[in-house]
């Protein structure tokens, strides 16, 4: 059986600079894959290319058997892939409700009932301006907004960035619940320890390539991962 999301030999360049140099990755139905890697290795570039924000120079992205390589971003969302971008990009001057409805596309309001049970704190703050939410609440809003598109694949770029350890745990518990509802997840994370605990598989990027990939539990004990990403001790 082929994977839900297949990324084949993906190359992305910015001018003469090669950023992605042949990425091969698959995401199975119902799986959570964590992408780890140092600053500047191309993680966000990969996410933006999958979402149709950046163009691939070569290679393929196939979602549920459909080639979505370099398709317009709205078509990619409609095909079932939605992104919660790096840096909590919400509309600060709009309410929580308005932010959520913007993520819902044509389905709009109908999706709120499906998404809100996962986010009780947002449910209590529907009329609050998004800019006045706490950092953790803004991150929740960002994830909830992506889910409003009813994606089969959810992309998350650094969901735990800048959050206190307790909130990091909350975010990963939430991701596990989202996965349990059948959404497949590709998550970029600096917090390797938290990501490897919850993810099924993980891939490590170096210099625009996948340097290492495997079961998350195995990578959490791999000496190279422990030394580079887990502070030298398991
Ligand atoms: N639009 C762009 N124009 C020019 N260069 C870009 C562009 N987007 C990304 N890059 C370059 O591509 C490289 C990879 O950036 P990217 O944001 O993908 O890294 P990252 O792995 O997400 O890093 P971080 O962990 O810091 O978020 C960087 O050198 C960056 O400057
Ligand atoms: Mg990034």
Image: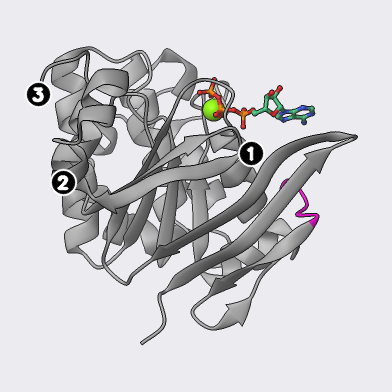
Question: Which x, y percent locates residue 215?
Answer: 21, 53
According to the picture, the residue beneath numbered tag 2 turns out to be: 218
> Residue, x 51% and y 48% (percent of image)?
83
Numbered marks: total? 3
Is 193 placed left or right of 86 in the picture?
left
Looking at the image, residue 116 sits to the left or right of residue 130; the answer is left
Q: Which residues are magenta?
A: 53-57
Alpha carbons under labels 3 and 2: distance apart = 12 Å
Indicate left or right for 208 with 222 as reference: right
Compared with 136, 3 (above or below) is below
Q: Residues within 10 Å of mark 3 (few under 14, many from 20)?
A: few
Residue picked out by circle 3: 234
Q: Is residue 134 above or below residue 220?
A: above
Q: Position of residue 80 (x, y in %)?
A: 50, 68
Quadrant position of ligand 2: top right
User: Depth check: 76 or 29 in front?
Assistant: 29
- Identify which residue, 53 or 200, lies in the foreground: 200
- Within 8 Å: ligand 1 and the Cβ of disc 1? yes
Q: Tag 1: Cα neighbours inside 10 Å, few (<14), some, or many (≥20)?
A: many
137 displayed left or right of 4? left
Q: Secondary structure at mark 3?
A: loop
The residue labelled by disc 1 is 45
Q: How is the image coloured?
A: one colour
């Amino acid at each position: 059986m082929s994977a839900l999301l297949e990324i084949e030999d993906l190359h992305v360049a910015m001018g003469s600079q090669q950023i992605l140099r042949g990425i091969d990755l698959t995401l199975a139905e119902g799986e959570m894959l964590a992408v780890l890697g140092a600053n500047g290795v191309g993680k966000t570039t990969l996410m933006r290319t999958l979402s149709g924000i950046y163009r691939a120079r070569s290679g393929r992205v196939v979602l549920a058997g459909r080639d979505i390589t370099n398709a317009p971003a709205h078509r990619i969302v409609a095909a079932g892939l939605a992104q919660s971008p790096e840096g909590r990009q919400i509309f600060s001057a709009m309410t929580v409700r308005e932010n959520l409805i913007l993520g819902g596309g044509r389905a709009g309001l109908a999706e709120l009932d499906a998404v809100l049970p996962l986010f009780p704190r947002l449910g209590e703050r529907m009329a609050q301006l998004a800019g006045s939410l706490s950092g953790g609440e803004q991150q929740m809003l960002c994830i909830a907004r992506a889910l409003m598109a009813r994606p089969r694949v959810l992309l998350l770029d650094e969901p735990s960035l800048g959050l206190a350890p307790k909130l990091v745990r909350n975010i990963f518990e939430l991701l596990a619940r989202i996965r349990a509802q059948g959404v497949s997840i590709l998550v970029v994370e600096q917090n390797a320890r938290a990501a490897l605990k919850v993810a099924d598989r993980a891939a490590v990027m170096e210099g625009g390539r996948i340097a290492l990939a495997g079961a998350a539990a195995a990578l959490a004990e791999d000496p190279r991962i422990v030394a580079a990403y887990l502070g030298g001790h398991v």
